Amino acid sequence: MFNLLVLFVSAGLIVIALTTLLNVFMFPRLRAKNPTTLTASPFVSVMIPARNEAKIIGEAINAMLAQDYPNFEVILLDDNSEDGTAEIAKLAGKDDPRLTIMHGQPLPDGWMGKSWACHQMAQTAQGDILLFTDADTRWQPNALTALVAEMTRTRADLYTVWSTQETVTWAERLCVPLMALVVVGYLPIIGTHYIPLSTFGAANGQCMAWRKTAYERIGGHQAVHDNVLEDVTMARLVKGAGLRLRMADAAGLITCQMYTDWRSVRDGFAKNILAGYGSSTALIIATVFHWLIFLFPLMWLMIDFSPLPLLLTLIGLLVRALTAVFTRQRLADALLMPVSVILMTRIALQSLYWQARFGGPEWKGRRITKSTPPTQSKSEGLLHG
């Protein structure tokens, strides 16, 4: 029995390590481009859903309006904010004609908040490219040009970018980079780009750029109106429809600080983790899997300091380290991967408790169920999908 366990852990770590190495060399990265070198400048509608984002919305609007791309509009939807989000956005825009501020309509029954906000904006957008981004992302002045250039070059129907995550507190540093571990370590980029199976579909809601015709073909956000993992689900619809999905790492051109402390990290990830795995049973199995892959070798090493448990422990740490370097996270934090696994277990338990006790997670003061959708979801869906 013990030998079978060692074989299972060894095989799992080898597959993850090989996937990581493959992706480190093959995963596309955004590169700065001069707008004068663009072969085409299609009109882009940049759409930002925002609810109670007064602290950050001014900076977000300033960053988008400072883009060097020559042909775009910015649409902000204020989703019934109570903190003056729309007023601050208007002041930041300084009457720039490229900025439109919409006031969101009441949330219909059965809709998730972010999907409803994006759906409303898409109805008024004039662009050939529909770009959905979040209020907490920050775009360097040449980021939009870089994105359009790559979307044009790759002929993508959906082009999604994994933002460079800004992590400050220990909770952020130990949990948020695990998104990169999953994307780079578990998802072969060859499969996402070239294998026509929906299971290889993934996307980051912090940056999803659509050809308008492709967006309409898969049914837009209406097709995922009741899905808390709308970004991943839409990517899988793209794959299922035979459309072209492409993704890239932001390489610092687009950044995001998703959370700011342990409570927001815990609740933010717990909000989506159960939906990502699909069931409580699957979430429990996944938690046990990660304990076996990343904690069992270390525990074995503590009682038997021999080459095999040492090698398995080092492989797990190396995978975490490689994904950290690739996505511009702190290399030294990889040494605390066992602590990260324990924290993610705590997050999983939080999600399971919410489901058993209340029928769904809580976010921004709302209980998220099919009948009471959330106001907005972050884009950590792939971490748990």
Image: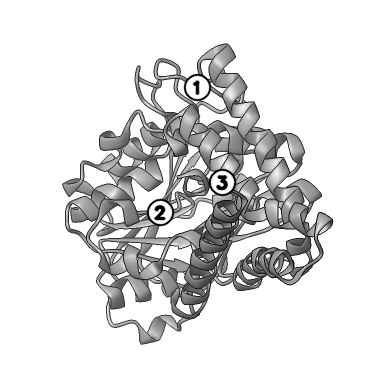
- Relative image position of residue 24 (x, y in whole percent): 52, 76
Amino acid type of the residue tagged 1 in the rendering: Ile
**Tag 2 residue:** 203
Q: Residue furthest bottom?
A: 37
- Relative image position of residue 271 (x, y in whole percent): 56, 32
* Front-lying residue, 358 or 86: 358
What is the crowding at mark 2: few (fewer than 14 residues within 10 Å), some, or many (at least 20)?
Answer: many
- Find residue 193 and report its image quarter: bottom left
Mark 3 vs mark 2: which is more N-terminal?
A: 2
* Front-lying residue, 332 or 267: 332
Asked whether, in this view, residue 196 is left or right of residue 268, the answer is left
- Relative image position of residue 209 (x, y in whole percent): 36, 58
Amino acid type of the residue tagged 2 in the rendering: Ala
- Mark closer to the observer (1, 3): 3
In three-dimensional space, the C-alpha distance between marks 1 and 3, rounded to whole angstroms, equals 27 Å
Rendered residue at 38%/54% (across/down): 202
Of the 4 image quadrants, the one containing the C terminus is top left
Rendered residue at 27%/77% (across/down): 40
**Tag 1 residue:** 368
Amino acid type of the residue tagged 3 in the rendering: Phe
Q: Is residue 91 visible?
A: yes
In three-dimensional space, the C-alpha distance between marks 2 and 1, rounded to whole angstroms, equals 22 Å
**Tag 3 residue:** 289
Asked which secondary structure carries label 3, the reply is helix
